[in-house]
Image (tube, rainbow, N blue to C red):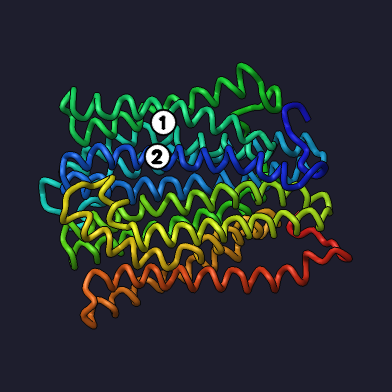
């Protein structure tokens, strides 16, 4: 199949690292959009950070929706490639792009129309709320392109061509970095300038993907972006992607409620700490997610081809790596939390509050790495329900746990403990559930592909 790479033969570790490196770098680039905005907006004060942070939860929801097609693409296209079925790989790619476009238009229209009622849920001061509404509506200019670009990324990852999404997203980030200070300070647009810079970068990324697939025809020459949906492919895409989207969408809704608790308990400093701290934590999360996504694509091809020993070797190598990274991140968060937080929000009250969040959250980093690594294994085997059940259950637990810990006098720190303890629980449960599944479906003397 033109442009694709066969991951079912050759040195396992070399292929895994070659695939994971660009994916991880792409995750950092996408994360850097928010961090860049936060770093520049942070110079405007904690209230500006709170305004952007409130919208960050909604853009997080948009990213969660994009996972329906990103995960659906990575698994369905990769398994088709592993089975040497070019027609199916092409059809799955087209269906995912079509579905992603429909979701993007519907979701962004909904957010634009109901921007004020949605922002009102955060109970922010009137001036901060108004800034959030304006920021949100400007960001929406780029969100549809961001959602569809996630599907394009999935197509390239599934095909073993993860360097191309990295290069494209890096161009978008550089554009955002250049435009942020120009629009925020030189043009005097404040938080609106950050939104315009982000949207511009996302549109540029989309156009570069179109160039690669339509003009250069890097993958699947003649690939149709929009096709008449067929039940066979649509049902498979939804079966694979819906649990992943629901997992992250539920997480976003729960985090929105946690933001509301943080705002009512600690004011705008509490909200700022949770949103800014969550974006800093994304450094750990995106590192693990890069390896998890690479593992998912690698496992999908090899599992579909019946090469279980290769699957297990890749799993062990990835688990060892993410575990080591988790230990390092725990040390950094616990001992250097204040210094790290101050890089992004240099206001004393902000980084002192942020250091408490970083220390408490730091204890769970290795367990978060564990959960995300297991997620990649589940996805690669075509089993997206298990990680969804684990994550949704653990995240829902955060709300009553946070309310209880706040009520017994821990204050806003009780919210941070609820987040940390639930992450530890999710990591342990994911490992236990995977080992149960592994004993049945990943035996080297018995191969039975599921969900084909």
Placement of the C terminus among the 4 image quadrants: bottom right
Q: Position of residue 312 (x, y in %)?
A: 75, 59
Identify the secondary structure beneath mark 2: helix
Q: Would residue 313 appear left or right of 95 to someone viewing this image?
A: right
Identify the secondary structure beneath mark 1: helix
Asked whether 414 or 11 is in front, the reply is: 11
Q: Would residue 104 appear left or right of 302 to someone viewing this image?
A: left
Placement of the N terminus among the 4 image quadrants: top right
Q: Is residue 88 above or below residue 367?
A: above
Q: Residues within 10 Å of mark 1 (few under 14, many from 20)?
A: many
Q: Position of residue 52 (x, y in %)?
A: 25, 44
Q: Are marks 2 and 1 in contact (CB under 8 Å)?
A: yes
Question: Which label was assigned to residue 173?
Answer: 1
- Report the residue marked by disc 2: 32
Q: Is residue 332 above or below residue 386?
A: above
Asked whether 124 or 181 is in front, the reply is: 181
Q: Position of residue 9 (x, y in %)?
A: 82, 43
The Cα–Cα distance between marks 2 and 1, rounded to whole angstroms, is: 7 Å
Q: Residue at x 58, y 69 (%)?
A: 430
């Amino acid at each position: 199949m033109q442009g694709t790479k066969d991951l079912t033969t050759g040195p396992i570790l070399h292929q895994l690292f070659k695939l994971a490196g660009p994916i991880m770098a792409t995750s950092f680039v996408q994360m850097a959009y928010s961090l860049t905005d936060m770093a520049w907006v942070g110079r405007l004060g904690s209230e500006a950070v709170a305004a952007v942070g409130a919208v960050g939860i909604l853009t997080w929801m948009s990213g969660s929706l994009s996972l329906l097609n990103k995960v659906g693409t990575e698994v369905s296209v990769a398994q088709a490639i592993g089975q040497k079925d070019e027609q199916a790989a092409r059809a799955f790619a087209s269906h995912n792009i079509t579905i992603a476009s429909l979701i993007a238009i519907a979701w962004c229209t909904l957010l634009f129309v109901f921007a004020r009622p949605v922002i009102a849920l955060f109970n922010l001061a009137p001036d901060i709320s108004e800034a959030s509404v304006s920021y949100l509506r400007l960001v929406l200019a780029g969100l549809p392109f961001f959602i569809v670009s996630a599907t394009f990324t999935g197509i390239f990852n599934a095909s073993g061509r993860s360097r191309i999404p990295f290069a494209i997203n890096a161009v978008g980030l550089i554009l955002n970095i250049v435009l942020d200070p120009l629009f925020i300070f030189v043009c005097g647009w404040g938080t609106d300038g950050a939104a315009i810079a982000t949207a511009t970068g996302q549109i540029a990324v989309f156009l570069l993907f179109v160039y690669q697939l339509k003009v250069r025809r890097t993958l699947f020459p003649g690939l149709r972006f929009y096709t008449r949906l067929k039940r066979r492919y649509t049902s498979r895409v939804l079966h694979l992607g819906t649990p992943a989207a629901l997992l992250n969408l539920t997480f976003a809704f729960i985090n929105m409620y946690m933001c509301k608790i943080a705002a009512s308990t600690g004011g705008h400093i509490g909200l700022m700490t949770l949103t800014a701290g969550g974006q800093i934590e994304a450094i750990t999360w995106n590192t693990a997610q890069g390896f998890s996504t690479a593992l998912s694509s690698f496992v999908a091809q090899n599992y579909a081809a019946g090469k279980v020993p290769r699957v297990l070797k890749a799993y062990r190598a990835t688990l060892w790596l993410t575990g080591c990274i988790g230990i390092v991140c725990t040390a950094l968060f616990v001992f250097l939390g204040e210094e790290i937080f101050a890089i992004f929000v240099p206001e004393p009250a902000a980084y002192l509050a942020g250091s408490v969040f970083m220390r408490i959250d730091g204890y769970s980093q290795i367990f978060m790495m564990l959960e995300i690594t297991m997620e990649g294994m589940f996805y690669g085997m075509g089993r997206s329900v298990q990680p969804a059940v684990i994550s949704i259950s653990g995240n829902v637990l955060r709300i009553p746990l946070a309310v209880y810990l706040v009520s017994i006098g821990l204050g806003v720190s009780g919210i941070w403990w609820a987040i940390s303890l639930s992450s530890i629980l999710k990591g342990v449960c994911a490992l236990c559930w995977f080992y149960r599944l592994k004993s049945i479906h990943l035996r080297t003397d018995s191969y039975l592909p599921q969900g084909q």
